[in-house]
Image (spheres, rainbow, N blue to C red):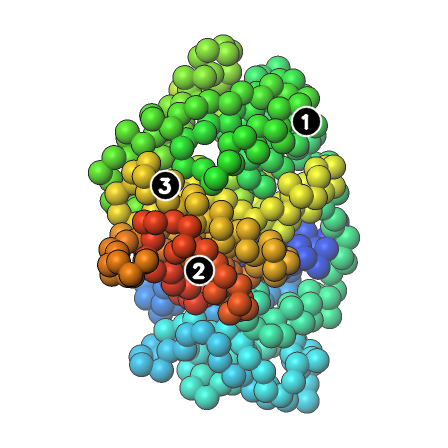
Amino acid sequence: MDKVLVLDFGGQYDQLIARRVREMSVYAEIRAYNKISPEQIIEEGYKAVILTGGPNSVYLDESPHYDRKLIEIGIPVLGICYGAQLIAWMAGGSVDSAGSSGEYGKTEVTVDKTDSEADILLEGIPKDSICWMSHMDYISGLPEGFMKLAHTEVCPAAAIGDPQRKIFGTQFHPEVTHTVYGKQIMANFLFKIAGIKADWKMDDFIETSVQCIRERLKGKKVLLALSGGVDSSVCAALLSRAIGDDLAAVFVDHGLLRKNEGDLVEAAFRNRFDMNFIRIDAEDRFLTKLSGVIDPEIRRKIIGEEFIRTFEDISEEIGDINVLAQGTIYPDVIESGKGDSSVIKSHHNVGGLPSVMRFDEIIEPLRDLFKDEVREVGLKLGLPKELVMRQPFPGPGLGVRVIGEITKEKLDILRDADAIFREEIAKAGLEAVASQYFAVLTDVRSVGVKGDARTYGYTVVLRSVTTDDFMTAEWTRLPYEVLERTSLRITNEIEEITRVVYDITSKPPATVEWL
């Protein structure tokens, strides 16, 4: 099986690059830049290398660099953003600060034909198209043997290539869906330049994972942190196939769930798998810990720690369980900070875990997958479509959708507003259009009029995004009629809410959740 190495230099999109490669049925692995040498790349049989972006400036001594042998060992290389700058720098070119001319977001890129083999990287790309830029530096001088393949209004070398050594770079991000022809560029590199075979399937992931889990957990009892969401559900199915009744799935109802969610989860899992299902009512426990806490990072960490402490308590009751399983997926990992990546927010099951736990081991079989890949695994494992395709719900639940202090009163208000929004989306048949949609209760109160009387109530925010990977997302263009019906119902049916607004911010610059 041919495989590609994604060499990580601390960018936020390293796993997204690997995901794009896997989408094309090519196996990809991610390694930190300082954990593998050019000699090891050859020894381990990688057919191509992709260098990721990163937050640093290549011309600074403290920035991550790599052995120049990489561009001399005969393996095709594609550098993206910082990776492209690193290639130019290693090959003897120059990289400088763009100053106020840095580019961010959607940018028009123009292809420069060279009438050489280097054009193959951008083959099939129109002369002008939209790409996604995010850089503060730029390649100011091409190295010997390299050609300029594309430019933007302010970036003279938006794509470069040395066809003889099969070394290429793009200043923009082809892995991001906003780059209209990014998939074509990635395919050109993989298949036309590197000559890689598309021979990796999701079935391989399932078979390999089940085998590895059986070997790793042989003779051990495992406690699964089951939220009832897509990720933990698929994790449950995968672990159930691997270890059967050695798995105890513990569903902690922390009082931060959506309306009627606890009962729905129990109905779905009580008798579905070959495992022990346990439901814990921990609302008072969690709300007591969260009382008076405003800071979202502290809140997430409290929720993360309290989850663990609850699981520890139940594991002692069950006895002989020292392995914790979680449905962590890659967006959780990357947003919580991995390697040199920046922390965006701590997820309760990654960055929010306490440093000291009574569990000897944690297993996260889905941590290298994106949401759509997790869903594919779930369907292949035989989970019902309505369970696998349901919209994501964060582990901290409504705890990251209440601005200001969390109280049971606020949570009940939000539960009702969120239920109305989801009902109206379903009535309009928009569930397949909106990838994730929910309500957020702000801490802002405003004046209103109900029944000819002055009111002073909360403002609720409606949020809906459309995405295929949850690393980037567009706000959903919901019909005005749906928003109007939702607003009327919320303000009429929920006395404490006076005003409804709609969030039209994409990711980036925002995240999907507010906290």
Q: In this view, does 336 lie to the left or right of 458?
A: right
Q: Dot 3: what SS?
A: helix
**Callouts 3 and 2 close, C-beta under 8 Å:** no
Residue 398's x, y, as percent? 40, 43
How far apart are labels 3 and 2 at the CA level?
Answer: 20 Å
The residue identified by callout 1 is 272
Categorize mark 2 by other alpha carbons within 10 Å: few (<14), some (14-19), many (20+).
Answer: some
Note whether 507 is above or below 340 in the view shown: below
Note whether 484 is above or below 297 in the view shown: below
**Callouts 1 and 3 close, C-beta under 8 Å:** no
The residue identified by callout 2 is 488
Residue 292 seen anywhere in this rendered image of the structure: yes
Residue type (three-letter) at the residue carrying disc 3: Leu
Query: Which of label 1 and label 2 is nearer to you?
Result: 2
Q: Residue furthest left?
A: 292
Residue type (three-letter) at the residue carrying disc 1: Arg
Categorize mark 3 by other alpha carbons within 10 Å: few (<14), some (14-19), many (20+).
Answer: many
